[in-house]
Image (tube, rainbow, N blue to C red):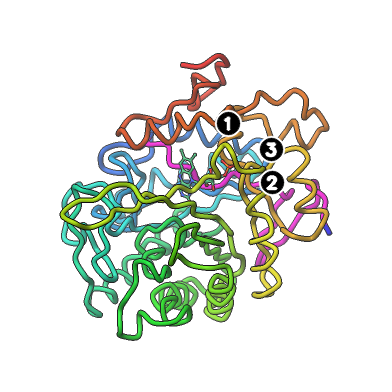
Amino acid sequence: MADMHDPLVLNGLRLRNRLVLPPVTTNFGTADGQVTDDILGFYERRARDVGMVVVEATAVRGDGRLVTRSLGIWDDAQQAGMARLAETIQARGAAATLQINHGGARCTPLGGEFQGASPSGFRFRPDVVPFVLDPGQIAQLVEDFVAAGVRARAAGFDAVEIHGAHLYLIGQFLSPLTNTREDRYGGDAAGRATFAVEIAQALRARLGADAPLLFRMNGVEEVAGGQTLEDAVIIAREMARAGVDAIDVSLSTLFVGSEVDGQRLLAASSALGKDRPAGAGVPHAAAIKRGSGLPVVAVGKLGEPQAARALGSGSADLVAIGRQLIADPDTAGKLLSGRAEEIVPCTECRQCFATIHRGLPMGCAVNGNPAGEPVFGGA
Ligand SMILES: Cc1cc2nc3c(=O)[nH]c(=O)nc-3n(C[C@H](O)[C@H](O)[C@H](O)COP(=O)(O)O)c2cc1C
Protein backbone atom coordinates (compact mmCIF):
# COMPACT_ATOMS: atom_id res chain seq x y z
CA MET A 1 0.00 0.00 0.00
CA ALA A 2 1.65 3.17 -1.10
CA ASP A 3 1.30 6.88 -0.78
CA MET A 4 1.81 9.15 -3.79
CA HIS A 5 4.94 10.60 -2.14
CA ASP A 6 6.68 7.23 -1.81
CA PRO A 7 9.59 6.45 -4.09
CA LEU A 8 9.56 3.29 -6.19
CA VAL A 9 12.46 1.36 -7.68
CA LEU A 10 11.82 -0.28 -11.06
CA ASN A 11 14.66 -2.59 -12.03
CA GLY A 12 17.19 -0.30 -10.38
CA LEU A 13 15.56 2.93 -11.60
CA ARG A 14 14.47 5.11 -8.68
CA LEU A 15 11.31 7.14 -9.18
CA ARG A 16 11.01 9.91 -6.59
CA ASN A 17 7.22 9.50 -6.27
CA ARG A 18 4.26 7.57 -7.68
CA LEU A 19 2.90 10.12 -10.17
CA VAL A 20 3.49 9.69 -13.90
CA LEU A 21 2.93 11.75 -17.01
CA PRO A 22 1.58 9.11 -19.41
CA PRO A 23 2.47 9.30 -23.09
CA VAL A 24 0.48 12.02 -24.84
CA THR A 25 1.06 12.69 -28.50
CA THR A 26 1.56 16.42 -28.92
CA ASN A 27 2.19 16.72 -32.67
CA PHE A 28 4.91 19.20 -31.69
CA GLY A 29 7.75 17.41 -33.55
CA THR A 30 9.05 18.24 -37.00
CA ALA A 31 7.85 16.63 -40.22
CA ASP A 32 10.84 14.27 -39.99
CA GLY A 33 10.26 13.25 -36.39
CA GLN A 34 12.79 15.53 -34.71
CA VAL A 35 12.55 17.10 -31.25
CA THR A 36 11.64 20.82 -31.25
CA ASP A 37 11.67 23.61 -28.67
CA ASP A 38 7.93 23.07 -28.17
CA ILE A 39 8.60 19.40 -27.36
CA LEU A 40 11.28 20.39 -24.85
CA GLY A 41 8.98 23.03 -23.37
CA PHE A 42 6.04 20.66 -23.01
CA TYR A 43 8.05 17.98 -21.21
CA GLU A 44 10.20 20.35 -19.13
CA ARG A 45 7.08 21.99 -17.75
CA ARG A 46 5.55 18.65 -16.71
CA ALA A 47 8.72 16.92 -15.45
CA ARG A 48 9.04 19.25 -12.47
CA ASP A 49 7.04 17.18 -9.99
CA VAL A 50 6.18 13.72 -11.33
CA GLY A 51 8.29 10.62 -10.66
CA MET A 52 8.35 9.56 -14.30
CA VAL A 53 7.62 11.09 -17.68
CA VAL A 54 6.70 8.71 -20.47
CA VAL A 55 7.36 10.53 -23.72
CA GLU A 56 4.69 10.20 -26.39
CA ALA A 57 4.42 7.40 -28.97
CA THR A 58 7.66 7.65 -30.92
CA ALA A 59 7.85 5.91 -34.27
CA VAL A 60 10.26 3.01 -34.77
CA ARG A 61 9.91 3.51 -38.54
CA GLY A 62 8.92 6.51 -40.64
CA ASP A 63 5.93 4.57 -41.96
CA GLY A 64 4.53 3.98 -38.47
CA ARG A 65 3.82 7.55 -37.34
CA LEU A 66 0.51 8.27 -35.63
CA VAL A 67 0.30 11.90 -36.66
CA THR A 68 2.22 14.00 -39.16
CA ARG A 69 4.58 15.40 -36.53
CA SER A 70 5.03 12.38 -34.30
CA LEU A 71 8.49 12.00 -32.83
CA GLY A 72 10.74 9.41 -34.45
CA ILE A 73 13.62 7.18 -33.37
CA TRP A 74 14.14 5.22 -36.58
CA ASP A 75 17.33 7.03 -37.57
CA ASP A 76 20.62 7.74 -35.80
CA ALA A 77 20.16 11.39 -36.84
CA GLN A 78 17.22 11.59 -34.40
CA GLN A 79 19.36 10.59 -31.44
CA ALA A 80 20.87 13.99 -30.60
CA GLY A 81 17.44 15.62 -30.20
CA MET A 82 16.29 12.67 -28.13
CA ALA A 83 19.32 13.07 -25.88
CA ARG A 84 18.36 16.72 -25.27
CA LEU A 85 14.83 15.60 -24.43
CA ALA A 86 15.99 12.93 -21.97
CA GLU A 87 18.35 15.43 -20.30
CA THR A 88 15.62 18.06 -20.04
CA ILE A 89 13.32 15.64 -18.23
CA GLN A 90 16.03 14.27 -15.94
CA ALA A 91 17.24 17.77 -15.06
CA ARG A 92 13.82 18.33 -13.46
CA GLY A 93 14.18 15.19 -11.34
CA ALA A 94 11.87 12.83 -13.23
CA ALA A 95 12.83 9.53 -14.82
CA ALA A 96 12.69 9.71 -18.62
CA THR A 97 10.95 6.87 -20.45
CA LEU A 98 10.43 6.72 -24.21
CA GLN A 99 7.37 4.99 -25.64
CA ILE A 100 8.21 3.20 -28.89
CA ASN A 101 5.51 2.42 -31.41
CA HIS A 102 4.43 1.52 -34.90
CA GLY A 103 0.93 2.61 -35.90
CA GLY A 104 0.32 -0.30 -38.26
CA ALA A 105 -2.93 0.10 -40.16
CA ARG A 106 -3.88 3.01 -37.89
CA CYS A 107 -0.89 5.13 -38.91
CA THR A 108 -1.15 8.46 -40.67
CA PRO A 109 -0.45 7.79 -44.35
CA LEU A 110 2.97 9.33 -44.97
CA GLY A 111 4.20 6.61 -47.31
CA GLY A 112 6.72 3.83 -46.78
CA GLU A 113 7.01 0.11 -47.20
CA PHE A 114 5.17 -0.81 -44.00
CA GLN A 115 2.36 1.72 -44.21
CA GLY A 116 -0.81 -0.22 -43.42
CA ALA A 117 1.08 -3.13 -41.81
CA SER A 118 -1.45 -5.40 -40.16
CA PRO A 119 -1.78 -8.88 -38.65
CA SER A 120 -4.94 -9.78 -40.58
CA GLY A 121 -5.93 -6.86 -42.80
CA PHE A 122 -8.41 -5.13 -40.50
CA ARG A 123 -9.06 -1.60 -41.76
CA PHE A 124 -9.13 1.43 -39.47
CA ARG A 125 -8.98 4.41 -41.81
CA PRO A 126 -10.47 5.13 -45.20
CA ASP A 127 -7.10 6.43 -46.42
CA VAL A 128 -4.94 3.46 -45.35
CA VAL A 129 -5.30 0.13 -47.10
CA PRO A 130 -3.98 -2.58 -44.79
CA PHE A 131 -1.74 -5.43 -45.89
CA VAL A 132 -1.16 -8.67 -44.02
CA LEU A 133 2.37 -9.07 -42.68
CA ASP A 134 4.28 -12.27 -43.47
CA PRO A 135 6.64 -13.79 -40.88
CA GLY A 136 9.69 -12.25 -42.56
CA GLN A 137 8.15 -8.79 -42.33
CA ILE A 138 7.20 -9.42 -38.70
CA ALA A 139 10.83 -10.31 -37.96
CA GLN A 140 11.91 -7.04 -39.61
CA LEU A 141 9.51 -5.09 -37.37
CA VAL A 142 10.86 -6.84 -34.26
CA GLU A 143 14.32 -5.63 -35.35
CA ASP A 144 12.98 -2.09 -35.88
CA PHE A 145 11.58 -2.02 -32.33
CA VAL A 146 14.88 -3.32 -30.95
CA ALA A 147 16.93 -0.75 -32.90
CA ALA A 148 14.64 2.01 -31.61
CA GLY A 149 15.00 0.83 -28.00
CA VAL A 150 18.78 0.66 -28.37
CA ARG A 151 18.83 4.24 -29.73
CA ALA A 152 16.59 5.42 -26.89
CA ARG A 153 18.96 4.03 -24.26
CA ALA A 154 21.99 5.36 -26.14
CA ALA A 155 20.32 8.78 -26.10
CA GLY A 156 20.12 8.59 -22.31
CA PHE A 157 16.53 7.51 -21.68
CA ASP A 158 16.22 5.69 -18.37
CA ALA A 159 13.57 3.29 -19.59
CA VAL A 160 11.74 2.13 -22.70
CA GLU A 161 8.00 1.51 -22.94
CA ILE A 162 6.71 -0.77 -25.71
CA HIS A 163 3.32 0.52 -26.91
CA GLY A 164 0.94 -2.40 -27.07
CA ALA A 165 -2.23 -0.42 -26.28
CA HIS A 166 -4.91 1.38 -28.28
CA LEU A 167 -4.99 -0.89 -31.32
CA TYR A 168 -1.79 0.29 -32.95
CA LEU A 169 0.35 -2.38 -34.56
CA ILE A 170 1.20 -4.43 -31.46
CA GLY A 171 -2.32 -3.87 -30.13
CA GLN A 172 -3.75 -5.15 -33.41
CA PHE A 173 -1.85 -8.38 -32.84
CA LEU A 174 -3.13 -8.62 -29.25
CA SER A 175 -6.81 -8.09 -30.03
CA PRO A 176 -8.98 -11.01 -31.19
CA LEU A 177 -10.96 -8.50 -33.21
CA THR A 178 -8.05 -7.56 -35.45
CA ASN A 179 -5.91 -10.71 -35.30
CA THR A 180 -7.43 -13.76 -36.96
CA ARG A 181 -4.11 -15.29 -38.00
CA GLU A 182 -3.72 -19.03 -37.99
CA ASP A 183 0.07 -19.09 -37.63
CA ARG A 184 1.99 -18.77 -34.36
CA TYR A 185 1.24 -15.01 -34.19
CA GLY A 186 -2.48 -15.65 -33.77
CA GLY A 187 -4.89 -17.91 -31.91
CA ASP A 188 -5.48 -17.64 -28.17
CA ALA A 189 -4.30 -14.75 -26.02
CA ALA A 190 -0.83 -16.24 -25.58
CA GLY A 191 -0.52 -16.78 -29.34
CA ARG A 192 -1.65 -13.24 -30.11
CA ALA A 193 0.99 -11.99 -27.67
CA THR A 194 3.80 -13.67 -29.66
CA PHE A 195 4.78 -10.53 -31.59
CA ALA A 196 4.95 -8.46 -28.38
CA VAL A 197 6.84 -11.24 -26.58
CA GLU A 198 9.41 -11.46 -29.38
CA ILE A 199 9.97 -7.70 -29.21
CA ALA A 200 10.35 -7.74 -25.41
CA GLN A 201 12.69 -10.75 -25.44
CA ALA A 202 14.86 -9.26 -28.17
CA LEU A 203 14.97 -5.89 -26.42
CA ARG A 204 15.86 -7.52 -23.12
CA ALA A 205 18.64 -9.49 -24.80
CA ARG A 206 20.06 -6.39 -26.53
CA LEU A 207 19.65 -3.90 -23.68
CA GLY A 208 20.81 -6.22 -20.90
CA ALA A 209 19.20 -7.32 -17.66
CA ASP A 210 19.38 -3.91 -15.97
CA ALA A 211 17.46 -1.85 -18.54
CA PRO A 212 14.00 -0.92 -17.21
CA LEU A 213 11.36 -2.05 -19.69
CA LEU A 214 7.64 -1.27 -19.52
CA PHE A 215 4.77 -2.60 -21.60
CA ARG A 216 1.61 -0.59 -22.24
CA MET A 217 -1.49 -2.58 -23.04
CA ASN A 218 -5.26 -2.37 -22.94
CA GLY A 219 -6.97 -3.66 -19.83
CA VAL A 220 -10.25 -4.15 -21.66
CA GLU A 221 -11.49 -3.34 -25.14
CA GLU A 222 -15.03 -2.17 -24.77
CA VAL A 223 -16.46 -3.58 -27.96
CA ALA A 224 -18.11 -6.91 -28.76
CA GLY A 225 -15.38 -9.43 -29.61
CA GLY A 226 -12.61 -7.23 -28.20
CA GLN A 227 -9.91 -8.27 -25.77
CA THR A 228 -11.21 -9.19 -22.33
CA LEU A 229 -9.60 -8.61 -18.95
CA GLU A 230 -9.00 -12.37 -18.66
CA ASP A 231 -7.00 -12.23 -21.89
CA ALA A 232 -5.15 -9.15 -20.65
CA VAL A 233 -3.98 -11.08 -17.59
CA ILE A 234 -2.68 -13.91 -19.78
CA ILE A 235 -0.87 -11.44 -22.05
CA ALA A 236 0.66 -9.64 -19.05
CA ARG A 237 1.95 -12.97 -17.71
CA GLU A 238 3.57 -13.70 -21.07
CA MET A 239 5.19 -10.27 -21.01
CA ALA A 240 6.45 -10.83 -17.47
CA ARG A 241 8.10 -14.05 -18.67
CA ALA A 242 9.54 -12.16 -21.65
CA GLY A 243 11.33 -9.83 -19.26
CA VAL A 244 9.30 -6.62 -18.86
CA ASP A 245 9.53 -4.91 -15.47
CA ALA A 246 6.12 -3.24 -15.28
CA ILE A 247 2.78 -3.10 -17.06
CA ASP A 248 1.24 0.25 -17.92
CA VAL A 249 -2.46 -0.62 -17.96
CA SER A 250 -4.45 1.56 -20.29
CA LEU A 251 -7.89 1.02 -21.70
CA SER A 252 -9.44 1.19 -25.05
CA THR A 253 -12.96 2.33 -25.43
CA LEU A 254 -13.91 1.51 -28.94
CA PHE A 255 -16.86 2.35 -31.06
CA VAL A 256 -17.80 1.50 -34.58
CA GLY A 257 -16.93 4.48 -36.71
CA SER A 258 -18.02 4.11 -40.32
CA GLU A 259 -18.21 1.66 -43.18
CA VAL A 260 -15.97 1.81 -46.25
CA ASP A 261 -16.14 -0.70 -49.13
CA GLY A 262 -18.44 -2.86 -47.01
CA GLN A 263 -15.89 -3.01 -44.18
CA ARG A 264 -16.59 -1.64 -40.76
CA LEU A 265 -13.94 0.75 -39.48
CA LEU A 266 -13.16 0.99 -35.81
CA ALA A 267 -12.26 4.11 -33.95
CA ALA A 268 -10.43 3.39 -30.69
CA SER A 269 -10.15 5.99 -27.97
CA SER A 270 -7.60 5.86 -25.18
CA ALA A 271 -9.59 8.02 -22.78
CA LEU A 272 -12.71 7.41 -20.74
CA GLY A 273 -15.76 9.30 -21.98
CA LYS A 274 -17.18 12.19 -20.01
CA ASP A 275 -19.98 9.96 -18.73
CA ARG A 276 -17.56 7.43 -17.20
CA PRO A 277 -16.46 7.65 -13.58
CA ALA A 278 -12.92 8.65 -12.69
CA GLY A 279 -10.82 5.61 -11.88
CA ALA A 280 -12.85 3.17 -14.00
CA GLY A 281 -9.57 1.65 -15.21
CA VAL A 282 -8.15 0.98 -11.74
CA PRO A 283 -9.76 -2.48 -11.27
CA HIS A 284 -8.15 -3.60 -14.55
CA ALA A 285 -4.75 -2.50 -13.31
CA ALA A 286 -5.35 -4.33 -10.03
CA ALA A 287 -6.32 -7.57 -11.81
CA ILE A 288 -3.26 -7.40 -14.06
CA LYS A 289 -1.02 -6.71 -11.07
CA ARG A 290 -2.43 -9.74 -9.24
CA GLY A 291 -2.27 -11.97 -12.29
CA SER A 292 1.19 -11.04 -13.54
CA GLY A 293 2.99 -10.29 -10.28
CA LEU A 294 4.43 -7.13 -11.88
CA PRO A 295 4.08 -3.54 -10.70
CA VAL A 296 1.42 -1.64 -12.65
CA VAL A 297 0.58 1.89 -13.72
CA ALA A 298 -3.12 2.82 -13.62
CA VAL A 299 -4.71 5.61 -15.67
CA GLY A 300 -8.09 7.16 -16.42
CA LYS A 301 -9.20 10.51 -15.01
CA LEU A 302 -7.10 9.98 -11.89
CA GLY A 303 -6.80 12.98 -9.63
CA GLU A 304 -8.01 13.83 -6.18
CA PRO A 305 -9.06 11.56 -4.47
CA GLN A 306 -8.83 8.58 -6.90
CA ALA A 307 -5.05 8.71 -7.36
CA ALA A 308 -4.41 8.32 -3.64
CA ARG A 309 -7.06 5.61 -3.39
CA ALA A 310 -5.60 3.57 -6.25
CA LEU A 311 -2.22 3.62 -4.51
CA GLY A 312 -3.51 3.27 -0.96
CA SER A 313 -5.66 0.25 -1.79
CA GLY A 314 -2.71 -1.50 -3.40
CA SER A 315 -4.53 -1.60 -6.76
CA ALA A 316 -1.72 0.25 -8.51
CA ASP A 317 1.95 1.03 -7.93
CA LEU A 318 1.97 4.19 -10.02
CA VAL A 319 -0.77 6.50 -11.23
CA ALA A 320 -0.69 8.37 -14.51
CA ILE A 321 -2.43 11.68 -15.08
CA GLY A 322 -2.94 12.58 -18.73
CA ARG A 323 -5.30 15.29 -19.84
CA GLN A 324 -5.29 16.98 -16.46
CA LEU A 325 -1.52 17.48 -16.77
CA ILE A 326 -2.00 18.95 -20.25
CA ALA A 327 -4.50 21.43 -18.84
CA ASP A 328 -2.53 22.31 -15.70
CA PRO A 329 1.15 21.31 -15.80
CA ASP A 330 1.40 21.91 -12.04
CA THR A 331 -1.25 19.31 -11.22
CA ALA A 332 1.24 16.80 -9.79
CA GLY A 333 2.95 19.42 -7.63
CA LYS A 334 -0.38 20.64 -6.31
CA LEU A 335 -1.49 17.08 -5.46
CA LEU A 336 1.80 16.29 -3.74
CA SER A 337 1.74 19.45 -1.65
CA GLY A 338 -1.90 19.15 -0.57
CA ARG A 339 -3.10 22.02 -2.77
CA ALA A 340 -5.58 20.05 -4.88
CA GLU A 341 -8.08 22.90 -4.69
CA GLU A 342 -5.66 25.02 -6.76
CA ILE A 343 -5.68 22.60 -9.71
CA VAL A 344 -7.12 24.20 -12.85
CA PRO A 345 -9.45 21.43 -14.02
CA CYS A 346 -9.50 19.72 -17.40
CA THR A 347 -13.00 20.02 -18.85
CA GLU A 348 -12.74 16.78 -20.85
CA CYS A 349 -13.65 18.67 -24.01
CA ARG A 350 -11.24 16.49 -26.06
CA GLN A 351 -9.77 19.42 -27.94
CA CYS A 352 -6.34 17.83 -27.35
CA PHE A 353 -7.38 14.75 -29.31
CA ALA A 354 -9.25 16.74 -31.97
CA THR A 355 -6.29 18.99 -32.76
CA ILE A 356 -3.65 16.28 -33.16
CA HIS A 357 -5.95 14.15 -35.31
CA ARG A 358 -6.56 17.14 -37.57
CA GLY A 359 -2.79 17.42 -38.03
CA LEU A 360 -2.49 20.48 -35.78
CA PRO A 361 -0.22 21.00 -32.79
CA MET A 362 -2.00 19.86 -29.63
CA GLY A 363 -4.38 22.52 -28.35
CA CYS A 364 -6.20 22.79 -25.04
CA ALA A 365 -9.33 24.77 -24.23
CA VAL A 366 -8.17 25.30 -20.63
CA ASN A 367 -4.48 26.05 -21.22
CA GLY A 368 -3.71 28.15 -24.28
CA ASN A 369 0.01 27.30 -24.16
CA PRO A 370 0.67 23.60 -23.52
CA ALA A 371 4.28 24.02 -24.77
CA GLY A 372 5.37 26.43 -22.07
CA GLU A 373 4.13 28.53 -19.19
CA PRO A 374 0.38 27.87 -18.95
CA VAL A 375 -2.02 30.50 -20.22
CA PHE A 376 -5.31 29.67 -18.57
CA GLY A 377 -8.44 30.66 -20.36
CA GLY A 378 -7.71 28.81 -23.59
CA ALA A 379 -6.14 29.46 -26.94
C1 LIG B 1 -3.97 14.17 -26.83
C2 LIG B 1 -3.66 12.78 -26.32
C3 LIG B 1 -2.66 12.05 -26.93
C4 LIG B 1 -2.35 10.76 -26.45
N1 LIG B 1 -1.30 10.08 -26.99
C5 LIG B 1 -0.94 8.87 -26.48
C6 LIG B 1 0.24 8.21 -26.93
O1 LIG B 1 1.02 8.74 -27.74
N2 LIG B 1 0.50 6.99 -26.41
C7 LIG B 1 -0.30 6.39 -25.47
O2 LIG B 1 -0.03 5.28 -25.03
N3 LIG B 1 -1.40 7.02 -24.99
C8 LIG B 1 -1.72 8.25 -25.46
N4 LIG B 1 -2.79 8.91 -24.91
C9 LIG B 1 -3.53 8.32 -23.79
C10 LIG B 1 -3.01 8.86 -22.45
O3 LIG B 1 -1.71 8.38 -22.17
C11 LIG B 1 -3.94 8.46 -21.26
O4 LIG B 1 -3.91 7.07 -21.12
C12 LIG B 1 -5.38 8.92 -21.46
O5 LIG B 1 -5.39 10.31 -21.76
C13 LIG B 1 -6.24 8.65 -20.23
O6 LIG B 1 -5.75 9.33 -19.11
P1 LIG B 1 -6.49 10.67 -18.55
O7 LIG B 1 -7.91 10.31 -18.29
O8 LIG B 1 -5.72 11.02 -17.30
O9 LIG B 1 -6.37 11.70 -19.64
C14 LIG B 1 -3.10 10.20 -25.38
C15 LIG B 1 -4.10 10.97 -24.78
C16 LIG B 1 -4.37 12.24 -25.22
C17 LIG B 1 -5.41 13.06 -24.51
Dot 3 beta carbon under 8 Å from ligand 1: no
User: Label 2 belongs to which residue?
Assistant: 19
Crowd band around label 1 with a 10 angstrom C-alpha radius: few (<14), some (14–19), many (20+): many
Residue 49: numbered disc: 3
User: Label 1 belongs to which residue?
Assistant: 45
Dot 2 beta carbon under 8 Å from ligand 1: no
Coordinates of residue 319 in the picture (x, y in percent): 68, 50
For mark 1, give the secondary structure.
Answer: helix
Residue stretch rendered in magenta on the structure? 2-27
Coordinates of residue 233 in the picture (x, y in percent): 59, 73
Q: Is residue 1 above or below residue 291?
A: above
Q: Is residue 113 above or below residue 377?
A: below
Distance from label 1 to label 3 (Cα)? 9 Å
The disc labelled 3 sits on which kind of residue?
Answer: Asp
The structure residue drawn at horizontal position 72% and vertical position 58%, both measured from the top left corner, is 317
The disc labelled 1 sits on which kind of residue?
Answer: Arg
Distance from label 2 to label 3 (Cα)? 8 Å
Coordinates of residue 88 in the picture (x, y in percent): 54, 39
In screen coordinates, is 9 left or right of 3? left
Q: Nearer the viewer, residue 335 or 54?
A: 335
Q: Is residue 39 above or below residue 310?
A: above
Distance from label 2 to label 1 (Cα)? 15 Å
Dot 1 beta carbon under 8 Å from ligand 1: no
Give the overall secondary structure of the magenta segment.
loop
Crowd band around label 3 with a 10 angstrom C-alpha radius: few (<14), some (14–19), many (20+): many
The answer to whether mark 2 and mark 3 are in CB contact below 8 A is yes
